[in-house]
Image (cartoon, rainbow, N blue to C red):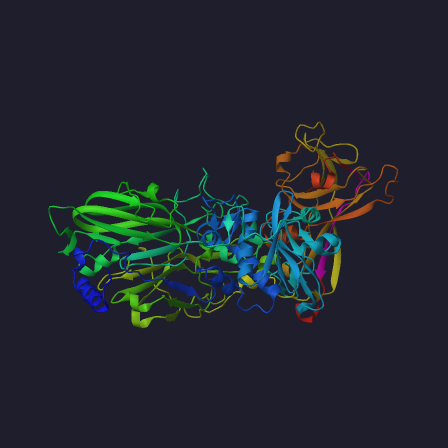
Amino acid sequence: MKCSGFLFTQWFAALCLIPLTAMHAFAEPVLVRSISVLPDKAPDCSSLKAIAASVTRGCQSNDEKAIAIYNFMRLSHYHRAYPSEPGGVPVLKEINTYGWSLCGGLHAEQSALWRELGWNWRFVGWPGHTTVEAHYDGRWHYLDVFLKFYAWMPDPSRPGARTIAGQDDLAANPRELVLDAFTLDPARKVVYARGNEFDLRGDKANWQAPAFLTCGDALADVVAGVKARSRAGSPEGWAGMNHATGNYSADVNLAPGFALTSSWDKRADAWYWPGSKTPPCHTCGDKEIRNSPEKGPLAEPYLTKDWTCESYASGELTFRPDFTSDACLRSFASVENAKVVGGALVATDPAQPARVTILLQSPYVLTQAGGTAEGVERCDVSTDAGKTWKPASFTDFGKAVSGQVTAHVRLSFRTLKQLRLTAIVQNNPFALPFLSPGKNQIAVTVADPTALGENRLAVTYAYCPGARSKTYEQLFLEGKEIARAHDARWDTTPTVVQKTFTARDLPAKFDLDVPTPKGQQPVYPRMVFVRREILAPGQSPLPLPADAHPPRANAGDELKSLPNPFLVGTQLPPPRVVRPLKTTNIPLGPTHLVAKSGEAVAGNLLRWPKTPQEKVESVALFLSGELRGLPPLKELAAARIVFPAVRTHDKAPTKLGVTALRTPFAPRTTFDFGQLGDVVSTIILPAQPADAPSWNPAREFKLDVTRHVRALINGDAKFRGYALRIVPDRSVDDGWTVRVQLPEQPQVYLEVDTYADTPATAKAK
């Protein structure tokens, strides 16, 4: 039977007159959709297209865009086993909810962002490793966010006369583009592009120099990988990490009474990782953070005493409907036999139970959930949009919803009061809208402001400002990493900024300044949370932390900023500054060969067992003396231990290191090798064929100890002597038990370079 237009109109008008409380169900609650709170310097992680667009803003070339995507992946991810889900994980969901994966998954995500820029991609397999290349400007380019590596090659047609090399380029010319183009910083244990190291250029620290291979991989591994490469095509995903977003949405959609709080901190046991018995954690510790200018400054505020590793963070989805108005019923997905009376929901027909259904919806997976209320008689949970229901404990139904981004909770009651539901969600902290030092302009938007009706949108930022007492130049001179929270502190109580908007106010923008005290250096604030909540008329926002306070203005505060982390590495390195040097030598003696037994040893051989079981006695050369005449810290250019050798091993090169003794060595007494100290510098001595003559005169070798000498001058270390020892390293000595022969009476000295001018008279080169 067909209805005429007139009859349909009459029917629909009659339907609209039916009281809200008598309706059995809504298709969904009245939602305010696509709530966005976005600082102007933070990435927009609402979609893959938004990520690609926001992190590449300001880029002038495709190479710069490729590096910006690489830096975003570096910031927002660490390597750990795949966070798999049945059917695979959409890249957008992994970025927002997880933040970790292995090589194939990370490169599936990177290629998904390239795709949004209109680039092609191809996966390239190495033995035990999956890489990916981007195609733009008519050629292939290789950027590895797992190993943390890319390399430049000459290209006169491109800006700066260079472009990012592809794997074919690296394999064809490994010496020029990899082995000779990079240098290992032995103290920091990271690699820098040669000519773009973390050093001083005149009186300015080149702290924006990108650090490569920050988790311990070697340049030789890159060369071996590209030589053994095999192409694997251009699939739209890898290892269960899918380009396609599917039915996942990163939108924040909230009904009145709901609040979503995204946090940078984690709650114990509130993680979701199918198949894992351990929580997600970057097992490399803070290696990547402390030396990476693209990641470290943003991450260092979280390196507190109880910090163990990069991991997940925990947000909170809260529902607390306002039962003083019938309008609260529109916050439910369905209402059956219920009405609002005297600040409670009661059964319209007292002879029958009433039921309401709550939609829990978040961009982030649910991990824990529970509620409190008066009058709940039964709780059921559905994770398939209401097709099936399972009974659950109202106070704790976390297991029933864990791993879901959407779930329905149905409550049965006669009278319902003081309802509050709380679900803990897992979010990737570095995909959240962080604040930056200096000025921040926050854009607040929703898909349709009229959906707010008479309700209000409240936005709350909680953060702890900080500052550093020393410059990057001072950090360099003192041998410190750029991002290990050295000489920095953050407030222990959060600063809170809260703004409330009506429908008429949206879209909106507001400024949020994060100042730096006068005379201090800027650092990123330690983010606590960002909250979005839809408030019913007359409803107050969720309580703030008990020790929270509004921004405090201090006389002399400055709005200092830091460079855009996504653009680190896109600029040519600053020129080196050539300064005249003066070199002096400080004797390190007398010297003594000492065995692990603690006794002085006759002869002139340095040796060390390659395994604890090997029957080779450890012998080191101990260096004593006094370091008198060291220059002031700013005048020290370099310091090297110079030692002689007459013969090395005939089968393989030898890795030799110098340690800083933890306790003084006294001649003719035993010494505990447990106090030998950490290796502060190493050098590779070449192999010497068996038929080659010994060096006569002895050949001198030099170990760079600049960083340690700076620590001595600055008072961060005490000089108790040095020791030269062999450092077994299969990648160098091929597993041989190597040795070094010294002269009968080796003369060892500290070679010290000091600047013979002032920085103002230095010339760039």
Residue 227 at x, y percent in the picture: 71, 48
Q: Quadrant of the N terminus?
A: bottom left
Q: Quadrant of residue 253?
A: bottom left
Front-most of residues 31 and 211? 31
Front-most of residues 85 and 615? 85
Residue 480 at x, y percent in the picture: 58, 54
Q: Is residue 180 above or below residue 740?
A: below
Q: Is residue 228 above or below residue 759?
A: above
Q: Is residue 1 above or below residue 700?
A: below
Outermost residue, bottom direction?
504
Q: Is residue 672 above or below residue 191?
A: above
Relative to 477, is 94 on the left or the right?
Answer: left
Residue 381 at x, y percent in the picture: 29, 44
Residue segment shown in magenta = 740-754
Residue 348 appears in the picture as rendered: yes
Residue 478 appears in the picture as rendered: no
